[in-house]
Amino acid sequence: MGHQPAIYGLDIETDNSNDGLDPAVASVRAVALSGRTFDELFVGDEADLLRALDDRLAALPLGVIATWNGSAFDLPFLADRARVLGTDLGLKLCLDRSLTLHRAPLPGHA
């Protein structure tokens, strides 16, 4: 059997005191990232958190990011918050139309 790609788990927590599902007003409070040999939690100033996450993701070997509804929420939310904050991320998103979505994508990402 060939080389298996690394699998990373990613989950975000948003501030839902106003509207935790709207990246125009809700901030990212924490991001958890895990792999076979590590578990990391990114917290603190939101722009710094996003930059630190971006740096960590860029340093990882190629692999698969596993999320719960990440393609329709977590990843677009991170990209939107970075844009709101004027933070440049290496995260580039494009919807894979071959996948069946079970929820509507975050507005602006359809």
Image (cartoon, rainbow, N blue to C red):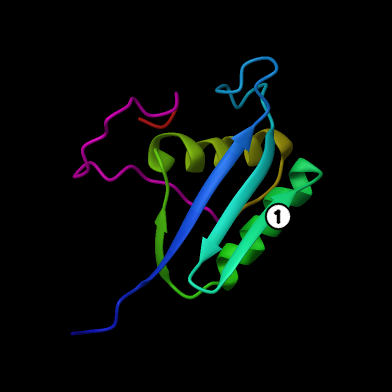
The residue at the point 81 percent across, 43 percent down is 45
Q: With 19 as the anchor, is 101 left or right in this view?
A: left
Residue nearest the observer in this picture, 105 or 85? 105
Residue nearest the observer in this picture, 34 or 82? 34
- The percent coordinates of residue 69 (x first, y second) are 39, 38
Q: Which residues are magenta?
A: 90-107
The residue at the point 62 percent across, 16 percent down is 19
State the image quarter where residue 29 is shown: top right
Q: With 77 as the anchor, is 50 left or right in this view?
A: right
- Quarter placement of the N terminus: bottom left
**Magenta segment main secondary structure:** loop
Residue to which mark 1 is pinned:
51
* Residue furthest top in the image: 18
Classed neighbour count for the residue bearing mark 1: other residues with Cα under 10 Å, few (<14), some (14–19), many (≥20) = some
Is 22 above or below relative to 61? above
- The percent coordinates of residue 85 (x first, y second) are 72, 37
